[in-house]
Amino acid sequence: MRNTPPKPRAGAASTNRMEDVALEAQVALVTVSRAINHPSQLAPRTLEKVQAAIQKLGYVPNLTAGSLASAKTRIIAAVVPTISNSFFSETIEALANTLDQHGYQLLLGQTFYREANETKIVEAFLGRRVDGIVLTGIHHEKTLVERLKASGIPVVEMWEHGPHPIDMLVGFSNFDAGRAAARFLIARGYRQLGYLGGYEHRSQQRLQGLRQEAGQHANVSVHAIETASPSPIENGVASLLELKKQAPGLDAVFCSNDMLAASAIYECARQNWKVPGDIAIMGFADLPIASACHPRLTTIRVHRKAMGESTARLLLDRLQGRPIASMAQDLGFDVIGRESA
Amino acid sequence: MRNTPPKPRAGAASTNRMEDVALEAQVALVTVSRAINHPSQLAPRTLEKVQAAIQKLGYVPNLTAGSLASAKTRIIAAVVPTISNSFFSETIEALANTLDQHGYQLLLGQTFYREANETKIVEAFLGRRVDGIVLTGIHHEKTLVERLKASGIPVVEMWEHGPHPIDMLVGFSNFDAGRAAARFLIARGYRQLGYLGGYEHRSQQRLQGLRQEAGQHANVSVHAIETASPSPIENGVASLLELKKQAPGLDAVFCSNDMLAASAIYECARQNWKVPGDIAIMGFADLPIASACHPRLTTIRVHRKAMGESTARLLLDRLQGRPIASMAQDLGFDVIGRESA
DNA sequence: ATGAAAGCGCTAACAG
DNA sequence: CTGTTAGCGCTTTCAT
């Protein structure tokens, strides 16, 4: 049935091509293309004919070919430390979902908290000529930043906030979140603050914030233990005990993650420490578990879903040539006072 | 510097092309291609020359073009209900990581527990000519199954087990897991079993298993409440209270998810119910929180990471023409007896 | 070991 | 509104 059946090459697909549809519908190949991509440009009757042919042949357009011809892939790549952390999985979920609704798809990369991985992964994504790139945080290898800036490809950095984005930015200040936590705890009368968190960059920023705010108050001290993993649970609980041993007067602990905080609350129960009587616990993120805890967890809510959605919208606006309202969006955070602190 | 600088088309990339590298290295274009894809076929000196040129120009091969020419995309698509659920995020994490190590990348789709979404998403993936597809579960729309079978594309279904896979299968029997939970609870002396879980298909299978095992014992009853969402926390806790009201003699509850179980344990503390004295709680999955709980959570461990890795390996073996040891892998599960039941 | 030629399946420009 | 022509940048035969 083929028009020109030349010696079929190795990679030759056994699938129907646009030409087959054109033949079937008795129109030119380009008309089929238009029926798919710009249906409004066609006469209703022509459109129908083509659609019928597509239907009949079960034709599925080859987007790879389309991408090559149009220099647009309709793929967005996102790089996060790991999707096992609810922090990022919910943002990615929202991002992918929003993109999907507009015909874009998400290619996923994970760094496992290694900067060098990030550079390598993005390199691979650039090779795929993705239409946009989403990065976690604002700290990247210098070569990566340069490459990205040179490429002119839309980039969104998320989950942090800072003065010199590569391109666009959607996040919040982790430092300020740490300060807010300190302010909250201090206002509630706690004086010996502890910090439980990993070595991850954003956690560290929150710790800095905590320290700086605490430093502005007499009689307020900060005790921190970094656990070995970036967002730990088991280690975290061990660290709580260690922390309490080092600073017996510890009266409140700010955890870098609600899951860690939830585990800490369990550990306090195990130790027979009253929360918040003997020790107050504050979390971070406002994950679902935070409101299920007993006592309910005081925490800092960050807008995980909104970050994903805003990131998607920014990218879509840019790709579709719409004006960008604000290149750097600070979505902030909310201190949620519950029972645990 | 271009060889033939014709009127630059719209989508014309400003990037270096293979030809630019060839010019720079004074070799034929195809030699550059080989330097990248089959370096062993080249004379060492030629290879060096080309690599130097690539380096000098900062050349990044266009994988879209390569994909079109070779009919291979090196992209694997995976569809899960949602990555917000740790169940799937850890499997996807392992999958993506393993694929990445072999030069494959992951395109992510989420159904949000709607079968129809799955069909639509996979359709889009097929348009991208992905090299393989990963599906969650063994229940799909009929049209999807047919399309997939007809396409001949490698498919792995995961997180369940059953007799008629579309192609390959990596998972475990949720039904058997439910039975195992019942057997465990009954052996520990519990008689009025409760079930807390969502309407999700795999949860339902576990409930069926629980019921069927319970049915084989006199004096053992099962009380179930389905919560409104597929894997709920807040509702789940409310349901626990409801369940206990309906069946005051309830002595053990099997939760469809460790997070739900952890929340249930918190709720019991709030109600002043001793766990496991007044009520035993059993979870599912063995998430990190399970071993941090107080009391530590008795649960069923499933091999989330291993499922992702096996899925990747199966796909890679198939794509690279290696023989497939077993097309359907049952990775099983382990009952982990801790303190809560 | 290297090269020349011929597409992969589609979209964009330019007519008509 | 529809068609013709010319590639997108790469990989694959097939030849040397």
Image: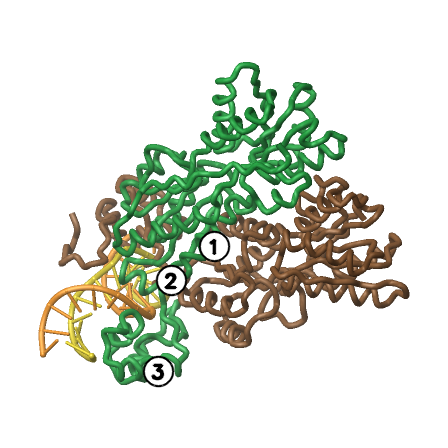
Chain colours: A brown, B green, C yellow, D orange
Q: Residue at x 80, y 50 (%)?
A: A280
Q: Which residue bears the numbered disc 1? A: A106
Q: Position of residue A28 (x, y in %)?
A: 26, 53
Residue A320 visible in image: no
* Residue A99 placement, left or right of A293: left
How many residues crowd mark 2 within 10 Å: few (<14), some (14–19), many (20+)? few
Q: Quadrant of the C terminus of chain B?
A: top right
* Residue A256 placement, left or right of A118: right
Separation of residues labelled 3 and 2 (CA atoms): 23 Å
Q: Residue at x 31, y 37 (%)?
A: B146
Q: Amino acid at mark 1?
A: Leu
Say above or below: B25 vs B283. Answer: below
Secondary structure, mark 2, is loop
Numbered circle sitting on residue B53: 3
In which chain is the residue bearing label 3? Answer: B
Q: Amino acid at mark 3?
A: Ala
Say above or below: B253 vs A261. Answer: above
Q: Foreground residue, B301 or A319?
A: B301
Q: Residue at x 57, y 15 (%)?
A: B219
How many residues crowd mark 1 within 10 Å: few (<14), some (14–19), many (20+)? many
Separation of residues labelled 3 and 1 (CA atoms): 32 Å
Q: Earlier in the sequence, mark 3 or mark 2?
A: 3
Q: Position of residue A61 (x, y in %)?
A: 33, 51
